[in-house]
Image: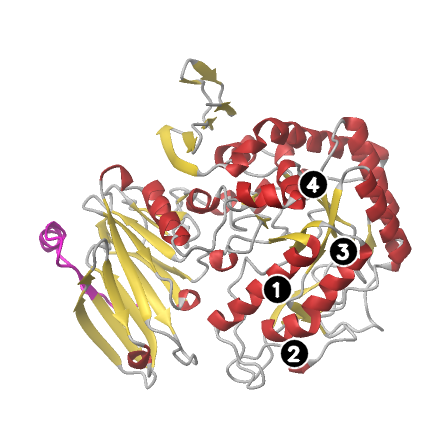
Amino acid sequence: MIAMKKFLPIILLLALSCSSRHELEVVKVLSDGTVVNETVKLSKKKDCYVYKVSQKDLNGIDTLTITPDFAFAQAGEEGYFVDGQGFATYFLADRPDVEYSTNRLPLAMEGIKTPNACWLEVFNTYRFYVWAVSSFKDGEYCHSLSLRLKDVEPFEDFEVRFYPLEGDEANYSGMARLYRKLRLAKGDMVPLKERAEKRPLLKYAVDNPEIRIRQAWKPVPCPDPNQTVENEPPMNVKVTFDRVCDIIDALKKEGVDGSQLTLVGWNLRGHDGRFPTVFPPEPALGGEEGLRHLIEYAQGNDFQIVPHICTGDAYRISEEFDEADVAKKADGSLMADAVYGGGQMYKLCYEVAYNKFVQKIHDGLRDLGFKGVMYNDVYSIIPPVECWDPNHPANHKQANEWAVKTLQDGTDKLGGIGSEGGYDNVSSVLDFCLYTTMSGLTKIEPNAHNNKRMRDDYFPIWHIVYNGYIYSCPFSESVNYSIKDPSIAMKIQEYGCHPTFYFYAAHRDDSHNWIGNRNSDLFCGTDEELATSVAAIKEGYDYIKEYGYIQYLFMDDHCQIAPKVYKTSFSDGTVTICNYSDTPFEYDGVSIAGGKWHIFKP
């Protein structure tokens, strides 16, 4: 990181005490490598301070890094930095020098709380080109925002707004409440309760557990990234369409009278088998006839059933693969991603994907009889895919318009839409996110000296903003929560989230299964395995029938009220106490045992 000016504590205090004067240290790296340092006074608006650079003035700038005078703290001080994913950095006294930057920011915000002040930073323009940079050096913490535009033609003004928070609002809950207020001011968000009243398929999905069933997949990691029809590896076939009928029977027998079933890997050659090709339904699972029978059987038993698809990825093994459809990098090369079930994965240009694949795939799914909150993978867990192909160029902002169209088309044709993560660029159309973040609790190393990401805690910023608008599972690790450690399982209750279950979640052959491992998985290979799995689902079913109403509420506040004890307050007066400690905790006359939770209804 380019060296930043250090503001002495006495100068910082004087600046903070003068509400009309705040400054930014600005470092520009120009396209020719020249570095320009400036000090800029922030403009004062009614309720915030603003830093703005016109589109014209961004020309010739590769990187623009801004550091406010209030974004410094000394080691050992109270407070934190919190990023747009909810991860917090405390001002630990004994951390080694480190710097961490990320552009994985599902919310277009950052938070700063020091002993002197509390601020919310919001960057609605160029939001996918902004990086958050936190550092610790020589006993001082520093937080910056870095706009990175190398190879990008400026397309709008760059603006960051800084909102001071005081009194009871001067904490992470206050930051999230304010961000929610700003988000709702755009006028494109409708509360989940209102939408569900008008859309029965959505209401059903919210009011019943989500059960995902991975039916078939090829080896991951793939043995040969250059996969062809001739060298295609055999599939793992685990759950045929007829076996899903058995799962429905077992659920009914256990007293689970309703769930939304999401079929994963029902398509040709299983999960990520030959995208963008999905039809016909995989013959080894029972083919189209077997799938149509399953859909009729599920719906006849009052279960909602939907497909998992991914219209943004492509593999060469697909007969529909065309390099002309793939998003291009600035140098003209193909936008390649991970090596997965179908081999080397490529990212489709979102415009091409929508016009060439999305609409016809959704039409085919509707023809099969699927109805409910369908799932289109990836769109809400990564930034929209930019494309430099001169035949269909798109910056992140333009690509996002196609992402919104894609998800909306799913709702229009099947009844609702879910995707993988919590990126709020698609929040106006998203009903369900499978998990708000893939990097969950086990990625946090409190007080760990080797924590290069500077992640000391997690704050439910996303949930305070979007609970009551989008229903969700909190972390990828929270899937199959009822058979997991309480430290992970209780997040469902703490955040008022959606019970979500997964048969054969851990499908990878290495250690990188982000949803869980085989010790926290659901199976149905035998009737005994199926019975055990269904019993785990029954716990989530019973929970949602009594407490599922919380999903329609707004989270008003979240805080720690004792060591390892957290209180969540919802908009109707519901309060949840989660006790992660080893000793009982008493609240409002109720003793809550260690490792347990209690919900106080209004």
- In the picture of the structure, the residue carrying the numbered disc 3 is 265
**Foreground residue, 299 or 542?**
299
Residue at 26 percent of width and 79 percent of height: 35
The stretch of residues the image draws in magenta is 1-24
**Foreground residue, 563 or 40?**
40
Task: Name the mark on residue 325.
Answer: 2
- Mark 1 Cα within 10 Å, few/some/many (few <14, many 20+)? many
- In the picture of the structure, the residue carrying the numbered disc 4 is 521
Residue at 64 percent of width and 67 percent of height: 312
The amino acid type of the residue labelled 2 equals Asp
Q: Mark 1 or mark 3, which has the lower sequence index?
A: 3
- Mark 2 Cα within 10 Å, few/some/many (few <14, many 20+)? many
- In the picture of the structure, the residue carrying the numbered disc 1 is 406
The amino acid type of the residue labelled 3 equals Gly
Q: Mark 1 or mark 4, which has the lower sequence index?
A: 1
- Rounded to the nearest angstrom, the CA distance separating label 1 from label 4 is 31 Å
- Rounded to the nearest angstrom, the CA distance separating label 2 from label 1 is 16 Å
Is residue 490 among the parts visible in the rendering? no
Query: Circle 1 — which element?
Result: helix
